[in-house]
Image: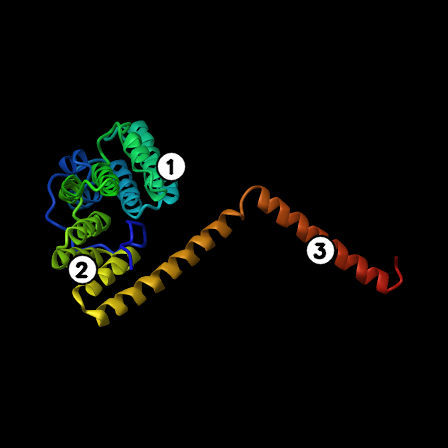
Amino acid sequence: MTVQPPGSDGERTEPASPLGDWRDELASGRFDAAHRAFTLTRDGAPEVGRALAGLAEVESLVRDKAWGRAVKRFDRIEDRPAIVPWEQLQEDLACLQRSGEALDRRRPDDALEELQHLKSGLFTAEAETQQGTALIYDDRLEEAASCFQRALDVDPRHFRALTNLGNVALEEGRIDDAITAYERALKLNDSFANAHHNLAVAYRRKGELGRSVRSLRRAQRLMQQRDAADARDRLGSMAGGRSVRMLRWLLYAAVAITLYVVLHSRGVL
């Protein structure tokens, strides 16, 4: 059984941590915390709150590596007060998507190259997580762990960074530390299949085969659900543009054929 590299699944949040001023949270790249702080104080114009709500959703989708949905949500932010460099954020989002896809293809050097082009400094947690992942592929475990810890300092809810800390611990033979990290990640997101899978690996190495099997079965179910959801998304995307026109013409053809058969059977044609 091998350790699963970091991936993406649905997210479940943990209880909120103490908040500072929303401006300070925003300057640190903590969009969700900034939105929650603004909601509590209402210290600003309504359009600021709407913009922060959109950015908080983008942050959650980025954390989940749901790049397509993150880009679409960013594009739907209509109120754009001058609280962040919007164009740079958009470019950074595209850069992180390219870097994440390079990591999925196990091309860490390409990912690190992409990360050099980040401009806004506001996606810090995700950038650190991706950098650490690239370093894991190069067996630079100590540097990778530092990256994941910096990511968690910015975003304590970053379940992929926690999972990766567990991966580092497992690679170093610190099985109990790995189990602790995986369990913490699953408290944040119990639907994260990779954490369940890697927890199964850790339990197996510890000799706890019953727990290992249960975690592995949970991981397999979640992976199947994820695959099904991805397939639905792909089918849904086919419903736009050219596919819609094709389906419309097929419907017209079916109606015409049915009408011809009916008329012909009655001797009209």
Residue depicted at x 10% and y 41%: 20
Q: Looking at this view, is 268 or 173 the one in front? A: 173
Task: Answer left or right for 267 relative to 113.
Answer: right
Residue depicted at x 14% and y 44%: 149
Q: Quadrant of residue 245?
A: top right
Please tell me whether mark 1 or mark 2 is closer to you in this view.
Answer: 2
Q: Which residue bears the numbered disc 1?
A: 75
Element at badge 1?
Answer: helix
Q: Looking at this view, is 99 or 20 the one in front? A: 99
x%, y% of residue 13? 22, 54
Q: Which residue bears the numbered disc 2?
A: 183
Q: Which residue bears the numbered disc 3?
A: 254
* Cα–Cα gap, marks 1 and 3: 38 Å
Q: Residues within 10 Å of mark 3 (few under 14, many from 20)?
A: few
* Cα–Cα gap, marks 2 and 3: 55 Å
x%, y% of residue 60? 28, 46
x%, y% of residue 49? 25, 40
Task: Answer left or right for 206 relative to 84.
Answer: left
As shown in the figure, which amino acid type bears the numbered disc 3?
A: Ala
Image quadrant for the C terminus?
A: bottom right
* Cα–Cα gap, marks 1 and 2: 35 Å
